[in-house]
Image (tube, rainbow, N blue to C red):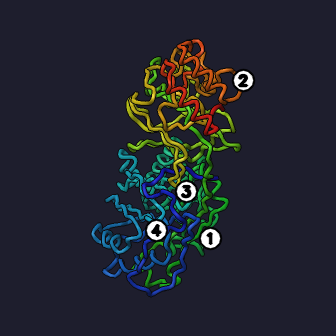
């Protein structure tokens, strides 16, 4: 599968690998730990680094280990000294660092990743999570046309073997399970120090709410019962896990999970005394490119409904003028003001078809529109705004910038519609207000060709199905003779209700450009 993405500001047609890759210069070079970095993969690593820093040299040791492994994402637990952690962050400029302040932190490699947002979860469950509130980070990964959006939840559950500790971990996992099920379309990765095994039987498994949840699978499951891969080698046991939600299940079949036995390179005692008592656990998976397809046209926009509220009744119609079916999955709907929505489902637009993206799926609430896909986080201003359809790499596939009625139509309760999907939709004069009533009484043709009750086909003055000099002659004659009538508005190409030289110019231009008609 291809994973959804939110476009970072630096993502415009990025190369892969990026041309401006940030150099990684380790503070020392004492060991030769193999790199895990692959440009066509995402590497996600969890690492409890034991009351960091254990001593004055720990920062340099951790710096070298990260510089050797070079994962894309690192989730840290037990960050006890923020000043020391800031020193580590400053020593690795290729990464962007986040510190939650409660022992949990994260680093993301900035060549390919953008941190979109971060927060802590479950503010009312401090006791259950041992006051280490889970750190949630939303990330965008882009390398060329390959792209992904992932949500990391970094956890450090309560340690200990008594009944109270068990119950606190169990309750923590119930919170996490409920969160995953409340966000079924998000690509969630829950990783960190779980402080328990996933292989125990139900009665003895404090992680059971996650283990038994059909919406969650553990990437660490294949190695969780093999001592060689123990993430906590002094026991030995496997207590540092990586779990994923349903949208990432396909990635489990192609991904690779391992415990990185750093102590094999440093020596066990040295590692235990100077770096950590936990080994890093890393999951990597490849990312498929999102198809860069052309032919999508923003064809109709309802920015100001009258029959229902804007919040329920706004919608956008898209058509496909290419010869191939195009999937909108993972494309970005945005404006220039920071609003954006990633299309998180398969929405296929076959050649010549029309699909509707809307704010409300229910026709009983949205004014009677059959919406093919419901979006959120994106609104249409009644004045000036932009509707931009963008590929994750930053390539703009189509865009419309309407202008408060200066050149684009702007009538409340009426959609603005492109007179022909082959016309340039960046030009306001190529749009008209709809005259066709639908649903609850607003005007528009959602999901259908942009026909007007009386005005189609535009420009075909003799209705012979072609566009040529005969149509121009007829239009010129009726304009000169003032005999163009409103019931024959196929000559009103700019939709202003008048018949004049502007309509003639538009008709001539589209004939010369071979762009008249459908």
The residue carrying mark 4 is 47
User: Is the C terminus in the top left, top right, bottom left or bottom right quadrant?
Assistant: top right
Q: Position of residue 104 (x, y in %)?
A: 38, 61
The residue carrying mark 2 is 464
- The crowding category of the residue bearing disc 2, from other C-alpha atoms within 10 Å (few below 14, some 14 to 19, many at least 20), is few
Left or right: 317 as drawn, with respect to 102: right
Q: Quadrant of residue 59?
A: bottom left
Viewer-nearest of discs 1 and 2: 2
Q: Position of residue 445 (x, y in %)?
A: 58, 23
- Residue 147, disc: 3
Give the secondary structure at mark 1: loop
Give the secondary structure at mark 4: strand
Nearest the eye: 85 or 425: 425
Give the residue drawn at x 64%, y 64%. Answer: 222
Marked residue nearer the N-terminal end (3 or 1): 3
Q: Position of residue 353 (x, y in %)?
A: 67, 33
Q: Answer yes or no: do the residues labelled 4 and 1 have beta carbons within 8 Å?
A: no
Give the residue drawn at x 51%, y 36%. Answer: 375
- The crowding category of the residue bearing disc 1, from other C-alpha atoms within 10 Å (few below 14, some 14 to 19, many at least 20), is few
Marked residue nearer the N-terminal end (4 or 3): 4
Reply above or below: 191 against 234. above
């Amino acid at each position: 599968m291809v994973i959804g993405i939110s476009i970072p500001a630096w993502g415009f047609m990025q190369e892969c690998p990026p041309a401006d890759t940030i150099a990684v210069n380790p503070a020392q070079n004492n060991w030769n730990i193999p790199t895990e970095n692959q440009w066509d993969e995402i590497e996600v690593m969890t690492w409890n680094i034991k009351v960091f820093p254990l001593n004055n040299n720990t920062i340099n040791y951790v710096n070298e280990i990260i510089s050797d492994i070079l994962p894309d994402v690192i989730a840290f637990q037990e960050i006890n000294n923020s000043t020391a952690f800031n020193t580590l962050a400053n020593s690795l400029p290729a990464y962007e660092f986040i510190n939650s302040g409660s022992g949990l932190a994260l680093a993301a490699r900035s060549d390919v990743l953008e941190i979109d947002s971060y927060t802590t979860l479950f503010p009312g469950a401090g006791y259950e999570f041992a006051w280490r509130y889970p750190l949630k980070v939303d990330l965008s990964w882009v390398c060329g046309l390959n792209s992904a959006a992932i949500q990391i939840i970094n956890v450090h559950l309560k340690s200990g073997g008594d009944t109270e500790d068990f119950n606190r971990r169990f309750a923590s996992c119930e919170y996490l399970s409920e969160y995953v099920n409340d966000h079924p379309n998000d690509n969630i990765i829950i990783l960190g120090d779980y402080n328990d095994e996933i292989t125990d039987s139900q009665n003895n498994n404090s992680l059971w709410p996650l283990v038994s949840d059909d919406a969650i699978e553990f990437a660490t499951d294949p190695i969780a019962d093999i001592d060689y891969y123990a993430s906590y080698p002094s026991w030995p046991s496997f207590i540092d896990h990586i779990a994923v939600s349903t949208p990432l299940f396909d990635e489990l079949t192609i991904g690779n999970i391992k415990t990185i036995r750093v102590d094999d390179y440093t020596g066990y005692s040295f590692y235990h005394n100077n770096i950590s008592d936990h080994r890093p656990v890393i999951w990597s998976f490849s990312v498929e490119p999102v198809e860069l397809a052309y032919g999508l046209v923003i064809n109709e926009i309802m920015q100001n409904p009258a029959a229902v509220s804007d919040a329920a009744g706004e919608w956008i119609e898209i058509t496909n003028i290419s010869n191939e079916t195009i999937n909108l999955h993972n494309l970005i709907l945005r404006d220039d003001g920071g609003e954006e929505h990633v299309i998180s489902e398969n929405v296929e637009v076959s050649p010549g078809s029309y699909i509707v993206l809307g704010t409300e799926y229910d026709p009983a609430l949205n004014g009677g529109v059959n919406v093919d896909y419901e979006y959120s986080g994106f609104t249409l201003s009644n004045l000036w705004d932009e509707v931009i359809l963008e590929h994750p790499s930053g390539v703009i596939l189509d865009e419309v910038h309407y202008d408060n009625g200066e050149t684009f139509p702007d009538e409340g309760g009426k959609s603005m519609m492109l007179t022909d999907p082959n016309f340039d939709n960046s030009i306001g004069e190529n749009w008209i207000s709809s005259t066709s009533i639908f649903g609850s009484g607003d005007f528009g043709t959602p999901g259908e060709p942009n026909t007007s009750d009386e005005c189609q086909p535009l420009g075909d003055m003799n209705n012979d199905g072609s566009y040529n000099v005969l149509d121009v002659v007829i239009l010129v004659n009726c304009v000169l003779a003032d005999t163009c009538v409103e019931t024959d508005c196929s000559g009103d190409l700019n939709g202003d209700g008048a018949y004049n030289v502007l309509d003639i110019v538009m008709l001539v231009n589209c004939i010369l450009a071979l762009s008249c008609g459908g």
